Amino acid sequence: MPDVPASLHRWRFFRAGGADQLAIERGDDLRHLGSLDPKLWVALACPVDGLELDARTLALMDHDGDGRLRQPEIVAAVQWAVAMLRDPQTLLAGGDLALAAVNDGTDEGRHLLAAARSVLAALGRPAATTIGVAEASEAAAAFAATPLNGDGVVPVEAFEAERRADVEAIIGVIGAATDLSGATGISQATLDAFVAEADAFLAWHEQGGAAGVQPLGAATAAAVAAYEVVRAKIDDYFARTRVAAFDPRALEAVNRQEAEYLAIAARDLSLTADELAGFPLARVEADKPLPLEQGLNPAWADAVAAFRAQVVGPLLGATTATLTAAQWVTVSGTLAPYRAWRAVRAGAKVELLGADRVRALRDGPARSEIAAKIAEDAAKAPERDALANVERLVRYQRDLVSLLNNFVAFRDFYSRERPAVFQAGTLVLDGRSCTLCLRVADPAAHAELAGLAKTYLAYCQCTRPGEAPMTIAAAFTDGEADNLMVGRNGVFWDRQGRDWDATITKIVENPISIREAFWAPYKKLVRLIEEQVARRAAAGAEAADAKIAGAAEQAATADTATVAAAKAAPKKIDVGTVAALGVAFGALATAFAAIAGYLGSMFQLPFWKLVLAIGMIVLLISTPSMVIAWLKLRQRNLGPILDANGWAVNAPVRMNVPFGSSLTSVARLPEGAQSSMIVRYPEPPSALPRLVLVLVAIGFVVSLLAHFKLLPKL
């Protein structure tokens, strides 16, 4: 069938979650996916981690290796898979890859097909017509584990013993490359880097053999090292002698003040004390030579002795006991060429090997033999690429369309035929099972954005022996929140069927259902009354305890006669107390009369009007709560929950009330189950029904009195 131009391709969409989503049903949909406006994709990016899809498949699509899949990478994967198949419709079937479906009209396709057949032949199935992920992955891994696997890196163990030492010497100074198998080895880039360093080092080393560069021959390096230790200090000494010669008044200053010596003399000293190291090398006098034996600063005595033995002796004579300023200039000038040569040192990485070893590795047979081995490995690159492509295509055949139905569109999520790739499992807690559970790395950061989803979320810490703990965010979309609280325990089943202990650690509160919102005002009223009663009872108990304690104290300290007199004295009536009681009884009487009048007026209505009036009162109380809940439930959106996990959701992903109810199952008795009405250990009868009957009776009496106009006026 000829290709249809992208501009003429007729797409099919389905409506879900408040947006039109692409229905991927035909091979041509895959062929033209790159031409679909990205604004019509439900997601534009997602993390590689935390998805219930094969991690290896996702890694193959993540071309830049940044741990995220983006829309261009998905398009590239689809286009490659389409090019490798005769008919892209094959991808929609999923499962194993049929060899007959591979497009062998291109070089890449022919190599892929040949590699697939060789894999099956190696497994003893030469007549097989399909290849699966396990077979392709095993073959690719086995080839990668061989010493020569086409990656351009040859492990050290792949060389003969004679060359192994040479390879180790090279990678020891340049650095090792890593083979596909994980072993350390050498690549052509490593060998080229060594040769470049060797060329630079040997050229520089040859310059060191020029006349005058090494006046002391092989001992020049040690002499210069000893010279560098004392150079600054000797320069300082001769500078001080010139200052003293310029003006005798400076002599005391250049030799340090006596107070400075007194300051360090008060402490325990050593000949190498840091305090002495800052003082001049010797006593400074005008144009005085530097003594090399007696009168030296003790902190520098050893360094000067080494300088004398390795520099002064060979250059000026072993009997030289002092060093003049002119001699110092001569010594410095003699060593200057070597110091200048060392300053431009090149090839420092390979210097430790020595010039002879470096020259042997560069110019001997080792270099060519190592290069030949690397070339032999590189020659297997087509075989490696073909096996890698087999694994890649087989994985795409199995997983690609599944990913598209959770990226381009959220078909899996809304069809409910199978869980979406971001659904981690099922949480069973508080008589409910929640299927919208996502892995979360940072609950605190996740909750900041996920709270905008208008969804009730419970973050649970999940633990299982032998497994690293993980955190999930579970959406409760049906039932009530009365018994959901931090610390409650449940069980989480992951997608592999493993059970985890789950404990709620954080809750993001939002309405769960309209039914819950209907009863919310009355529950709040009951909780308010309970809190007030508990508060009053606690206050009363404290007051009673205080009175008892006071009475006990008085009883323990009171005089017997005083107690007897108090008993004989008549009790006084507090007028204020009587007035307060009167006001209280009056208020109660007024309130009771108002309630009675209201009830009387209600009970004068016909029965159906009475029922309607009670219903209207209930609705007036519950409607505001229900309206607020309804508005929030209409806005319930999966997008912020996924965005908080690193997704880039591009379209509304709403979860209305019916769909939300399908994500959370409330416990119900099985069909045909029988329930006994016998209650073991029943609760004692409540006084509330009796109170209601009394109030109804009072209302009925009041209504009769009002009807016959016998109700007294207050």
Image (cartoon, grey):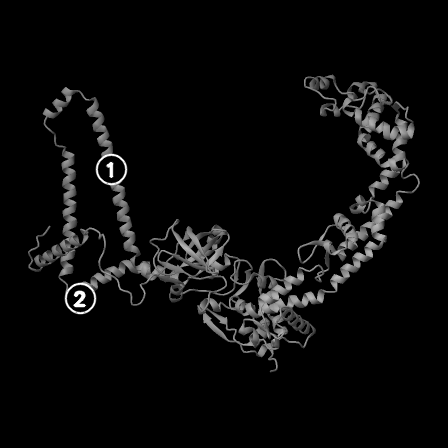
- For the residue marked with disc 2, what is the amino acid? Trp
Front residue (pair 703, 522): 522
Which residue is denoted by mark 2 in the rendering? Answer: 608
Q: Is residue 197 above or below residue 124?
A: above
Under tag 2, what secondary structure? helix
Query: Where does the N terminus fall, quadrant-wise?
Result: bottom right
- For the residue marked with disc 1, what is the amino acid? Ala
Q: Is residue 698 left or right of residue 59?
A: left
> Do we see residue 199 in this rendering?
no
Q: Residue furthest bottom?
A: 1
Numbered badge on residue 218:
none
Numbered badge on residue 541:
1
Which dot, 1 or 2, sits closer to the camera? 1
Q: CA distance from mark 1 to mark 2?
A: 47 Å
Circle 2 residues within 10 Å: few <14, some 14–19, many ≥20:
few
Q: Is residue 582 above or below residue 79?
A: above
Residue 336: x, y in percent? 87, 36
Under tag 1, what secondary structure? helix
Residue located 26% across and 64% down the image: 674
Q: Is residue 301 above or below residue 142?
A: above
Residue located 16% across and 38% down the image: 580
Q: Is residue 616 left or right of residue 399?
A: left
Among numbered discs 1 and 2, the one appearing first in the sequence: 1
